[in-house]
Image (tube, rainbow, N blue to C red):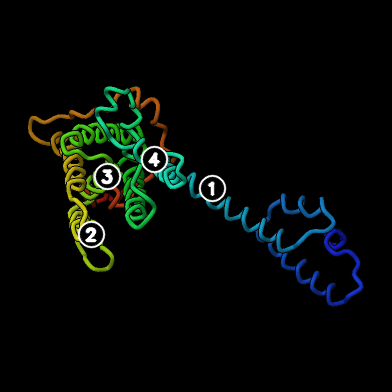
């Protein structure tokens, strides 16, 4: 403690100033004890004079950065990559580094000018920063993550294949309905698949409506209609989501049915990793099909 005092408090003639420095020392020591970081001590012993407020700000900033980094890295791989790409694309447009005219879906430019990046970038731009952008980002992040951590847990390859299948089908349909940005429709597709796999989950929409999860895509479509937006995008997302859900969850269980959607082995090899916890048991709302779907009552007798 004496060493710390020597570096922090040079000799002063004013007792008032000495008292103020002592109070600042106590605050910094408390922060050091809370953070428990060795780098704080190294910062203290390498300088003789410093502004304690600046040091406190640096410590708090570093704590916030480390917290954000930890939370960010806990987001599943596909959800993290897709939402980050959407945010960075929107930021680039806002900073005028690129323009929406370089991103939108245009079959002629793709086929004739070989601007193949448009096949991807049209899914990444949700318009300028505002209510519509934040609304879409919240739903995209929430339901993409719940799918990846729920019914696709430990099956990242299958989740990537669902992205590719949905994107391809949406691109084909989008050609006929003249849509230039398909990101919102893709979000509705994710919401639809999650809602059909969790039919027993109760939903609350802005505290106004209570309904079962399968009605969520239709509620969102009605909300878009009230805002004066075109519902073609919502219908496209619902249609593509239903095609995937039917081929993946319904048709294989029908008499004479089978699995038509099989993830290529190369995708599984690239993305699938062993599950972190072999004993992980998802919550009922995260299981495919909802609560206890396809399961009998638990056997408590061992």
- Mark 3 and mark 4 in contact? Answer it, CB < 8 Å: no
Nearer-the-camera pick, 153 or 123: 123
**Residue holding disc 1:** 69
**Residue holding disc 3:** 190
What's the distance in space between the residues labelled 3 and 1, CA to CA? 26 Å
* Camera-side mark, 2 or 4: 4
What's the distance in space between the residues labelled 1 and 2, CA to CA? 36 Å
Disc 4 residue crowd, few under 14, some 14–19, many 20+, Cα 10 Å: some
Left or right: residue 168 versus residue 280 is left
Q: Residue at x 77, y 50 (%)?
A: 42
Where disc 4 sits, the SS reads: loop
| Disc ID at residue 227 | 2
Where disc 2 sits, the SS reads: loop
Left or right: residue 252 versus residue 162 is left
**Residue holding disc 4:** 99
Disc 1 residue crowd, few under 14, some 14–19, many 20+, Cα 10 Å: few
Query: In the rendered structure, which disc, 3 or 4, sits on the residue that comes first in sequence?
Result: 4
* Camera-side mark, 2 or 3: 2
- Mark 2 and mark 4 in contact? Answer it, CB < 8 Å: no
Query: In the rendered structure, which disc, 2 or 4, sits on the residue that comes first in sequence?
Result: 4
Query: In the rendered structure, which disc, 2 or 3, sits on the residue that comes first in sequence?
Result: 3
């Amino acid at each position: 403690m004496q060493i710390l005092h020597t570096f922090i408090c040079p000799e002063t003639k004013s007792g008032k100033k000495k008292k103020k420095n002592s109070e600042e020392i106590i605050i910094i020591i408390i922060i050091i004890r809370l953070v428990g970081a060795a780098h704080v001590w190294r910062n203290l012993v390498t300088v003789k004079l410093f502004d304690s407020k600046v040091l406190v700000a640096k410590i708090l900033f570093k704590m916030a950065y480390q917290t954000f980094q930890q939370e960010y890295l806990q987001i599943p791989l596909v959800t993290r990559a897709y939402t980050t790409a959407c945010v960075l694309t929107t930021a680039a447009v806002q900073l005028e580094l690129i323009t929406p005219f370089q991103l939108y879906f245009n079959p002629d430019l793709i086929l004739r000018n070989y601007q193949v990046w448009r096949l991807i970038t049209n899914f990444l731009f949700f318009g300028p920063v505002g209510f519509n952008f934040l609304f879409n980002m919240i739903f995209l992040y929430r339901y993409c993550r719940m799918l990846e951590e729920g019914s696709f847990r430990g099956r990242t390859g299958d989740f990537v294949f669902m992205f590719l299948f949905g994107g391809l089908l949406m691109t084909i349909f989008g050609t006929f309905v003249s849509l230039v940005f398909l990101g919102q429709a893709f979000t509705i597709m994710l919401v639809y698949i999650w809602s059909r796999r969790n039919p027993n989950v109760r939903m609350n929409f802005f505290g106004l409506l209570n309904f079962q999860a399968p009605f969520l895509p239709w509620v969102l479509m009605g909300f878009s209609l009230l805002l004066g937006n075109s519902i073609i995008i919502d219908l496209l997302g619902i249609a593509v989501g239903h095609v995937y859900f039917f081929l993946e969850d319904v048709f294989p269980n029908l008499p004479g049915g089978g699995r038509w959607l099989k993830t290529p082995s190369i995708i599984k090899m690239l993305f699938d990793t062993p599950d972190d916890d072999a004993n992980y048991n998802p919550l009922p709302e995260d299981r495919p099909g909802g609560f206890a779907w396809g399961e009998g009552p638990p056997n408590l007798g061992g």
